Image (cartoon, grey):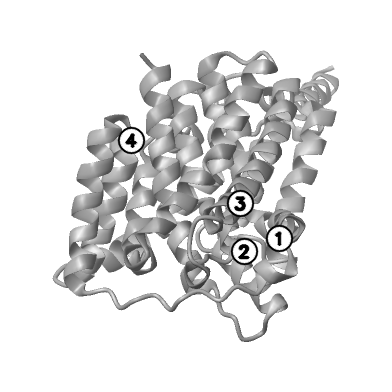
Amino acid sequence: MEKNGFFSFLIDNLKEFLTYTGFANMTTGHIVMILVGLLFIYLAIKKEYEPLLLIPIGFGILIGNIPFKEVGLMVGIYEQGSVLNTLYGGVTQGWYPPLIFLGIGAMTDFSALISNPKLILIGAAAQLGIFAAYTSALLLGFDPSQAGAIGIIGGADGPTAIFLSSKLAPNMMGAIAIAAYSYMALVPVIQPPIMRLLTNKEERLIRMKPPRAVSQTEKILFPIVGLLLTAFLVPSGLPLLGMLFFGNLLKESGVTRRLAETARGPLIDVITILLGLTVGASTQATQFINWDSLKIFGLGAFSFVIATAGGVLFVKLFNLFVKKENRINPLIGNAGVSAVPDSARISQVEGLKADPTNHLLMHAMGPNVAGVIGSAVAAGILLGFLSS
């Protein structure tokens, strides 16, 4: 009897152990999300679509969708006090995005924008996607705060999308962040057809004047003046705008090289790893798979298309009112979205296809960095009037 009791005890323990395994707790949703994570990793490695973002996010999706029995194990990202939940605090409390902006500022050269300030209008025009998505989200039944958080996907700026959604729609942050980063990675797929559709051969052959040389004094003054102008206009965007311009001043001052190198190197790398991994892990199937998530992905695609088209069409309209020698090539209109520097590279690639001797990269960097500022300003505007 003792021997039989011992074996019965072992069998009961084995049965109990099996209830804790991922196999016992797996759902169809978990399988779907694991496949999505594998797709992200594939696109990052095979296609080299934003690998620094998609690999952490893709692997995070795998981590977040390992099924487990929710009995106080304290391993899930939504369990208060777990390691993943603590790391996720940088997302939910909104302090990863400003640190990302600090690094972006420290690695960004605003010379193209300073030399041709009118290019900032292209960055502003591309924000049309944000407000188009905001309006569409309202029509689909989302409340104003949720619609504002969804709309920012049109800026093609992952950190900004995370920052705004953490303030306005925390329950939708995972879907919004994944959508924003997905469309950033798919810039080479989404933008070229729109650019070719909206331009003719003559427009694609436009040659722009070479950008003028920008003095060191101008580079130093730009982040200071930029901060004062934008932050006084939109104080609610201060966490992003302040860190962006601070990082740029570290770069351009010439006397804080070590700080600038830290901001654009080790710091932004560490934060990108933590942000990507935890955002990916937040796509836990039980929390993520629902109709709202699908609507968010659809609205994100729509907003990105509108943003790209808005930038290109604005350039075409602008060219109607300037002399022929001052025209802007509409192929840089797509760069008004905040996907730095990928959208500017697409301008270069499409320009070379039309004319192998026409290099548009430096011109495209103007609206591209303007898009970074524009998306942060747009986020500040939405945060200002939706959180009041």
Q: Residue at x 59, y 33 (%)?
A: 176
Image coordinates of residue 285 in percent, x first then y, are 72, 29
Mark 2: few/some/many CA within 10 Å (<14, 14-19, 20+): many
Q: Which mark is residue 302?
A: none
For numbered disc 3, what is the local secondary structure? Answer: helix
Q: Earlier in the sequence, mark 1 or mark 4?
A: 1
Inspect the image, locate mark 4, and give the three-letter code of the amino acid beneath it.
Answer: Gly
Q: Residue at x 74, y 58 (%)?
A: 189
Q: CA distance from mark 1 to mark 4?
A: 34 Å
- Badge nearest the viewer, 2 or 1: 1
In this rendering, is residue 308 above or below 151?
below
Q: Pick the residue in front: 358 or 297.
A: 358
Q: Is the residue under label 2 in contact with that under label 3 (CB below 8 Å)? A: no
Image coordinates of residue 257 in percent, x first then y, are 21, 71
Q: Which mark is residue 199?
A: 1
Q: Which residue is mark 3?
A: 184
Inspect the image, locate mark 2, and give the three-letter code of the amino acid beneath it.
Answer: Leu
Q: Earlier in the sequence, mark 2 or mark 4?
A: 4
Q: Earlier in the sequence, mark 2 or mark 1?
A: 1
Q: Pick the residue in front: 63 or 41.
A: 41
Q: Which residue is mark 4?
A: 237
Inspect the image, locate mark 3, and give the three-letter code of the amino acid beneath it.
Answer: Met
